Image (cartoon, rainbow, N blue to C red):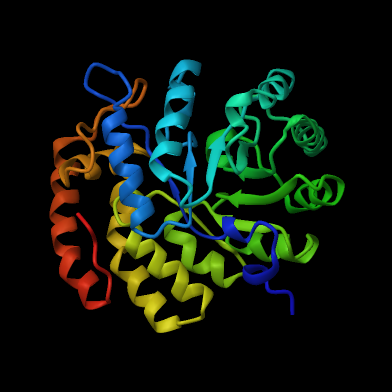
Amino acid sequence: MYDKYTYHPYRHLTGAGVALITPFLENGQVDSASLSRLTEHVVSGGCDFVVLLGTTGESPTVVYPERLLLIDVVRRAIDGRCPLVIGVGSNNTQDLCQRMSDPIYDNVDAILSVVPYYNKPTQEGLYLHFMAVAEASKKPIILYNIPSRTGCDLLPETVARLQRDSAKIIGIKEASGHVERIGEIRELCRPDLLVYSGDDHLTKDIIRAGGDGVVSVVANAYPQAIKALVSALITEQREQADEIDALFTEMYQLLFKEGNPVGIKGLLHTIQLIETSAVRLPLCHATEQLTSRLHKLHEELLVPMQQLGIEPRL
C-alpha cells in the first residue's frame, strides 16, 4: 500500500495546516507584531504548515507592498520550522501568470491558487487556466475549490486532468462542502494527490473519506487541538478524534456566524493573541454579542481540552 505520510515527496505538506489571519491595527495598517506573535503561537502549537494570504488572510484587500511585508514577517517567525504556502490567485489568467514569476515567492514551499471567481468559466476554461498557471509557476500548486465564494466549481474530472498533465499540481483544498467529493477525487486521481479539508467542521469526515489534512481557521486559536484531531484521524484513533471534534462543534458554528475571518479575529482579540479584531471593508468588526459568546465558549473549552490531553498555550 502506498503510504504518502512516509514516501510522498510533499509529505511535509500533509496534516494540520493553518489558514493564517492578517492582523490589522485600528488605523488599517498591518500589525506586524501581532502577526509574528500569532505565527509563533501556531507553529510552536504543532501546526504542520502555514497558509498565508488565503481567504482567512483577507487577500483581496492586501496590496503588493503589504504582501511583501507579510511574507517576510511570517518567514522570519517560522524560521524554517515548517513549510509556508502562499495564496496567489486571480480571475485574470494572464496577470496571474506574470505574477507567478515574482521572486517574492522564491522562498515559499507551495502556492495555493483559488478557482477563478466572477467570470464563471467552463471546466475547459478552468483546465486551461490552471495549466497556464502551473507552467508559469516555479513552485508546486495546490488548487483551491470554494464554490460558495467563487461561483464556480472545479469538478473531480478536471482535477484528474490537471494532475495527469502537470507535475506541478500536487493537491487540492476542497471547500465545496460535499464530503462525497473526496471519494470521487480519490477514484479519478492518482493516490499521490494531496487532498485537504477547507472546512473545519468537515475535517473529520473528509480525512476519513481519504483526505490528507486540513487548512484550518480554528487552528489560529487552537493549534494544539487541531493537530491532535488530525493526528488521531490519520492514526485511526476514532474515539479520540470523535471527542475532539465534538468538543468544537459550537465553535465551528460561531466562528462563521458573521463570516470569515470576522469571527476568528474576534476570538483571537478576546484571548489576547492579536492587538485588535480589525478587518478591512467591506468586512466589519465582529459584533459585541458574538465576541462575548466566543470568549465565554473559549473559557468553557479549556478544562475539557486538558482532559483530552490538549494543553492550549494561551
Q: Is residue 54 above or below residue 284?
A: below
One can see residue 219 in this view: no
Is 231 on the left or on the right of 247, as rendered?
right
Residue drawn at 67 percent across, 52 percent down? 171
Q: Position of residue 214 (x, y in %)?
A: 50, 57
Residue drawn at 48 percent across, 24 percent down? 67
| Quadrant for the N terminus in the image | bottom right
View extreme (right): residue: 165
Q: Is residue 29 above or below residue 89?
A: above
Is 293 on the left or on the right of 240, as rendered?
left
Residue 31 occupies quadrant: top left
The number of numbered badges drawn on the structure is: 0
Is 286 on the left or on the right of 112, as rendered?
left
Residue nearest the viewer, comparing 227 with 291? 227
Q: Position of residue 209 (x, y in %)?
A: 60, 70
| Quadrant for the C terminus in the image | bottom left
Q: Position of residue 41 (x, y in %)?
A: 30, 50
Residue nearest the viewer, comparing 270 with 150? 270
Q: Position of residue 84 (x, y in %)?
A: 52, 44
Residue drawn at 66 percent across, 42 percent down? 153
Is 293 on the left or on the right of 282, as rendered?
left
Residue drawn at 68 percent across, 27 percent down? 100
One can see residue 51 in this view: yes
Residue nearest the viewer, comparing 222 with 117? 222
Residue 10 occupies quadrant: bottom right
Q: Is residue 154 above or below residue 23?
A: below
